[in-house]
Amino acid sequence: MTEVMVPRARLVCELVAKTARLMIGIPDYQTYVTHRQANHPGQPVMTYEEFFRERQAARYDVGKGRFRGCC
């Protein structure tokens, strides 16, 4: 591969991986951090572990008497 193609191929791979994670319900932590820093400066940012648990709870927890999952 040429020097120009390597960064482009890496970017494509990163975008494909990000899309695949979103399709199966794994949100992007770095996108969350960037959003918090840009839109909510001075407010705390969850750790990766806190973020992951919160996203799992939002997707799979029982709320208002019903299951809030994908199935």
Image (cartoon, rainbow, N blue to C red):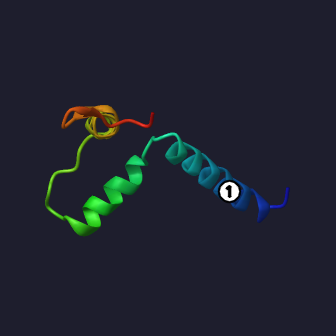
Residue at (32, 37) in percent of width and height: 68
Name the spot of residue 32 as percent of width and height, x first: 34, 54
Residue at (18, 65) in percent of width and height: 41
Q: Quadrant of the C terminus?
A: top left
Residue at (32, 54) in percent of width and height: 33
* Viewer-side residue, 39 vs 8: 39
Number of dots carrying numbers:
1
Residue extending furthest toward the right: 1
Note whether 31 is above or below 40 in the view shown.
above
Q: Quadrant of residue 34?
A: bottom left
Q: Amino acid at mark 1?
A: Val
* Viewer-side residue, 64 vs 56: 64
- Secondary structure under badge 1? helix
Left or right: where 21 falls relative to 1: left
Q: Which residue is mark 1?
A: 12
Neighbor class of circle 1 (other Cα within 10 Å; few <14, some 14-19, many 20+) is few
Residue extending furthest toward the bottom: 39
Q: Quadrant of residue 69?
A: top left
Name the spot of residue 40 as percent of width and height, x first: 19, 64
Note whether 2 is above or below 17 in the view shown.
below
Residue at (40, 52) in percent of width and height: 30
Residue extending furthest toward the front: 65
Q: Quadrant of the N terminus?
A: bottom right
